Image: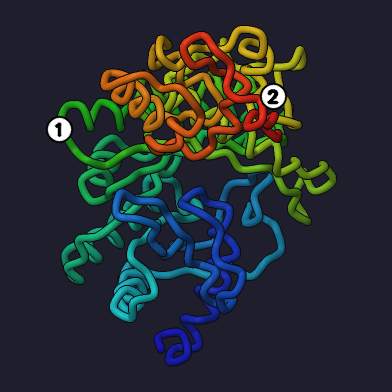
Amino acid sequence: MLIKAQPELSEKLALMGNAARHEPAGDAPDEQLDKAMHCIAYVATPQGRKPILKALLTSHCERSCHYCPFRAGRPMRRVSFTPDELAAAFDAMHRAGLVQGIFISSGILNGGVAIQDKILATADIIRHKHKYAGYMHIKIMPGAEYDQVRRAMQLGDRVSVNLEAPSAKHLQKLAPQKNFHSELTKRLAWTYEIRAREGLRAGTVTQFVVGAADETDLELLELSARLYRQLGLRRVYFSAFEPIPNTPLEGRSPTPPIRERRLYQAGFLLRDYGWDVEELPFAPDGNLRTDVDPKLAWALENLAEAPVDVMKASRRELLHVPGIGPKGADAIIKARKLGPLRSLEDLRAIGIRNVRRAAPFILFGGRRPDRQLTLFPAG
């Protein structure tokens, strides 16, 4: 097996895996994997869940972001790959059936432009020398040039420009050496322009660090909504802050994982359900409730005493009902053209699984569902 045959590569990948876990490229690695395989994450694709190599060209970095494990000056063991080494490592892992894609990122060394060149060289070697045509996610570094962004979008299926914070003011608390507008948001805009002009398939994503800069959920989600609707972002990642020893924020409390979860739920309502930010149920402090998910919180305030009739409701109204998603809303609209929907069992029959979650908030031809089947949904 590749890792056993090359112990030096095994050690490098183990170290890189620990660093790369902070990059938003997919789900966390399987805890049952060997430590050297913690550089493998999983991404959702139209073809299903796929394992990918999360790779850093180097864990050396000349910047001192306050939350980052490989910030300049922090005592740690640093490792680097050349573009040829990383490309060959990926090719071997791909041929061995360990991974079905790659995410290429790096610490910043000798400036964003220089390290972006190395990232692009790695991608080019994988695509052309090793003839790989599968999934590739390429990180756009702060300060990358326009032609570099364009080349990344030609080579990759996905590119990422990590904003980290929802404004320049908040970014200063996390990464005072980064410029929110000239280094980051400008490059997000470039990806939109390039995709629109050249018809490239590469989607764009970004990441926010949650809870380290005193930002509110409202601030995070307002910007997320603009990015989805104005720049066509594929996904916004939220990463709950975890304090790292020997960093300026090591004494700050970690962000509860439930806050990250609620942000994802709210973000999907904005991206996939057509909700507006103003509809999300924020508390007076600008944050979401953590005891129940945002959709249920909204329904408890707005639908408990005014349920929607599944025979009359618009698609948008149906998408505000807990337990009914885009596919379910479409199934209801299609089914009711063929005849009346009279019960929760009718909803189950057309593919809506969580009918009990929806039950307190819907009517069938003006009637409430059977009380024996109407269990109040859990938070």
Amino acid type, label 2: Leu
Q: Which residue is mark 2?
A: 288
Residue at the far bottom in the pictured view:
5
User: Which quarter of the picture shows residue 266?
Assistant: top right
Report crowding for label 1: few under 14, some 14 to 19, many 20 or more residues within 10 A (C-alpha).
few
Split into 4 quadrants, where in the image is the N terminus?
Answer: bottom left
Query: Which element type, helix, strand or loop, lies under badge 2?
Result: loop
Judged left or right of residue 199, residue 320 is right
Q: Residue at x 36, y 61 (%)?
A: 102
At 48% from the left edge and 61% from the top edge, which residue is drawn?
Answer: 41
**Visible in this render: residue 18?**
yes
Is 3 rendered above or below residue 53? below
Closer to the camera, 212 or 182? 212
For label 1, the SS is helix
Q: Which residue is identified by label 1?
A: 198
Hey, what amino acid is under mark 1?
Answer: Glu
Mark 1 or mark 2, which has the lower sequence index?
1
Q: Residue at x 80, y 48 (%)?
A: 250
